[in-house]
Image (cartoon, rainbow, N blue to C red):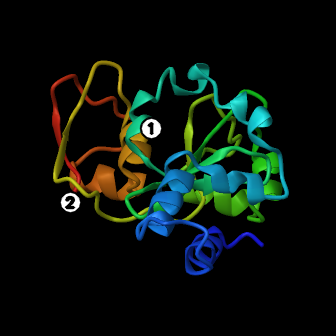
Amino acid sequence: MTDYRGWAAGLQAAGYATSQQYSEKLIGLIEKYQLYIYDSPGPQPAALGADSAMDYARYGWVKSFRMEGFARDGRKIFLNNGKKCIVARKSDNLRKLADLFDISQKRLKKINDLPYSGSLQPGQVLYLEAKRRNAEVKTHTVEKGETLYEISQRYGIKLKILCRRNGMSPGIMPYTGQVLSLR
């Protein structure tokens, strides 16, 4: 019932449409407007407003991530550097996210290089899969106020690797304009 591609092809094959590109156009519209979310058993689009502008205040670069789909609670799942990630909401904590994504809190902390307390900030990027050793781009020029942790999350690379590659330790604050190697 949720195979919208199959239904579109079936409608065209049954002679419902006169256009030879009917199924392609229909599938294109469904994907463009993400109408497939109506097929999911979880919250419907009216509940999806929780990804407010506030979520992106500190991590605006998340807007460049590719949207991969939706979680059971309606939040967006993104793909960055080939790895699935989400944006934390104001009401999130590690236990809630671990339950939602069927992953242990310990693993979630490890994947995201979080300290023992693991407190979350709204808008913070959290990966659901282990980050990579290399980013898709070679370098990053540090902007005012950026931390190594934020840069690591931005490019989906392990913090330990980023630090080692640039001769730094996690607590060091990079200076504005510094060029960091990401590969």
Q: Which residue is mark 2?
A: 183
Residue at 76%, 59% in the rendered image: 39
Residue 108: x percent and y percent?
66, 57
Whole-percent x, y for residue 4 in the image: 64, 68
Which of the 4 image quadrants contains residue 50? top right
* Residue receiving disc 1: 62
Q: Quadrant of the C terminus?
A: bottom left
Question: Within 10 angstroms of label 1, few (less than 14), some, or many (20 or more) residues?
Answer: many
In this rendered view, identify the residue nearer to me: 84 or 118. 84
Q: Amino acid at mark 2?
A: Arg
* Residue type of the residue flagged with mark 1: Val
Q: Is residue 112 visible?
A: no
Q: 130 or 3: nearer the eye?
A: 3
At a point 74% along the width and 64% down the height, the residue shown is 103
Give the SS element for disc 1: helix
**The N terminus lies in which quarter of the figure?**
bottom right
